[in-house]
Amino acid sequence: MFTGLVEEIGTLKSISRKGEAMLLGISAKVVTEGIKLGDSISVNGVCLTATSFDASSFTVDVMPQTYRNTNLKDLKPGSRVNLERAMSANGRFGGHIVQGHVDGIGTIVGTSQDQNAVVFEIRPGKPSLFKYIIPKGSIAVDGISLTVVEAEGGTFTISIIPHTLAETVLAFKRAGDTVNLECDVLGKYVDHLLKYGRGGVETEDEDASGVESGINLPFLAANGFV
């Protein structure tokens, strides 16, 4: 699990492709401190496994499923990437729950200045993601824990303070560039449970075992959740 607080910007130093499989070599200084074989590292918001490393770099494999559903396929030698190690049990939880499981790719429609902040307007590639993108709610953009400002008309906006812009790859993003999107996991779980409750996944009001589900819209309403 990650928090969406980027620890450093890494640089892609090598890339090996075989069909939709890739091996990435990434230069880094911070995330290689105390690294162990098999450690999870978020690369542009994608949870990947360190397969080899030294003091200044590490390698990760990208499987076809990840290739197809993230913007890692667009990387080239020299590309910059956001890096974050998995959260330690005694660490501060400064962002929000980020799994590193990308829900889809978004495209930057444009940027604008709002005094000391830069506002990014992003269009998700999957319209179905919009039910999870809520004004003032959390979203991870290329692995960065951010707050949605507005969400309407098929796009949403995020407002970036100077520190975040300087410490992440958003500083190098322009209109037309892509970003990885991970919506708030809590919303996805609630949506999944409600599908069971109203028969959207299994039989009506039953789970996979045939037992009546106790979570549905009347239950949530009766207990003050909706």
Image: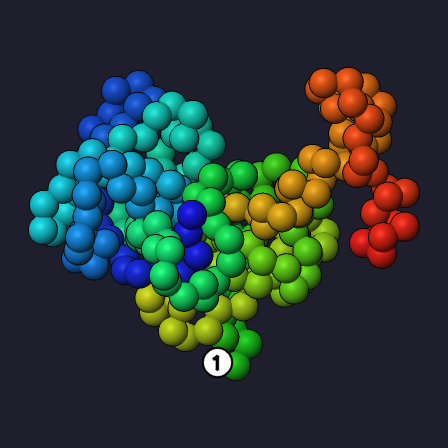
Q: Is residue 188 left or right of residue 38?
A: right
Amino acid, disc 1:
Asn
Label 1 SS: loop
Answer above or below: position of 175 versus 202.
below
Q: Can you name the residue that lies furthest to the front here? A: 211
Q: Is residue 94 in view?
A: yes
Answer above or below: position of 116 versus 105.
below
Residue at mark 1: 116
| Residue at point 29%, 37% (across, down) | 49
Q: Residues within 10 Å of mark 1 (few under 14, many from 20)?
A: few
Residue 137 in the image, given as x and y percentages of width and height? 63, 59
Q: Is residue 115 left or right of residue 188?
A: left
Q: Is residue 205 left or right of residue 62?
A: right
Residue 169 in the image, given as x and y percentages of width and height? 35, 57
Q: Nearer the viewer, residue 188 or 65?
A: 188
Q: Can you name the residue that lies furthest to the left here? A: 55
| Residue at point 27%, 57% (across, down) | 9
Residue 41 in the image, given as x and y percentages of width and height? 31, 45
Find residue 126 and report its image quarter.
Answer: top right
| Residue at point 48%, 69% (across, down) | 160
Q: Is residue 24 in view?
A: no
| Residue at point 23%, 30% (across, down) | 23
Residue 92 in the image, given as x and y percentages of width and height? 41, 66
